[in-house]
Image (tube, rainbow, N blue to C red):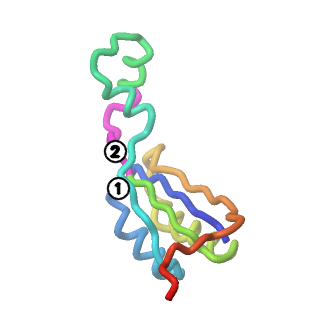
Amino acid sequence: MYALFLVLNETDYLEEILARFVDVGVQGATILDSQGMASALVSNRGRDLPLFGSLKTLMEGARPYNKTIFTVVDNEQLAERVAEAVKDVLGDVDHPSVGFMFSVPIGKVYPLNRSE
């Protein structure tokens, strides 16, 4: 099993990515509102350090918040299909920081449903 994480800065693509998840066989995913470290530092008012001014310049036009999507899939082949689906959706976006995706192997899953 694999856990897949996608930090999506271009949130306009969220629905299309989720539709592609379903198309390739993902059973469910969790979506969190998130914020990157640079954005959090820049938005922290009262900082008057040169570093933060530089970050603010880099962040101009960037979205302050993003979406973090994670899911668990049964095997490496499905993880690869999901990654390819995301690349297909975002492949033509020419923004340098669209987001990033990574997978982590899972040792064990502990279902928390009630037993009867």
The residue drawn where x is 50% and y is 62% is 70
Q: Residue furthest bottom?
A: 116
Which quadrant holds the N terminus?
bottom right
Q: Nearer the viewer, mark 1 or mark 2?
A: 2
Question: Which residues are drawn in magenta?
Answer: 58-66
**Coordinates of residue 37 in the picture (x, y in percent):** 45, 34
- Amino acid beneath label 2: Tyr
Residue toward you, 64 or 33: 33
Numbered badge on residue 105: none
Element on which disc 2 rests: loop
Residue toward you, 63 or 108: 108
Give the residue at mark 1. Answer: 11
**Coordinates of residue 30 in the picture (x, y in percent):** 43, 65
Residue 49 falls in image quadrant:
top left
> Compared to 98, does 13 lie above or below?
below
Numbered badge on residue 65: 2
Based on the picture, tell me whether residue 114 belongs to the magenta stretch. Answer: no
> Compared to 80, does 102 lie above or below?
above
Q: Residue furthest front?
A: 116
In three-dimensional space, the C-alpha distance between marks 1 and 2, rounded to whole angstroms, equals 9 Å
The residue drawn where x is 48% and y is 43% is 96
**Left or right: where 99 falls relative to 31:** right
**Coordinates of residue 11 in the picture (x, y in percent):** 35, 56
- Amino acid beneath label 1: Thr
Q: Are marks 1 and 2 in contact (CB under 8 Å)?
A: yes
**Left or right: where 115 falls relative to 14:** right
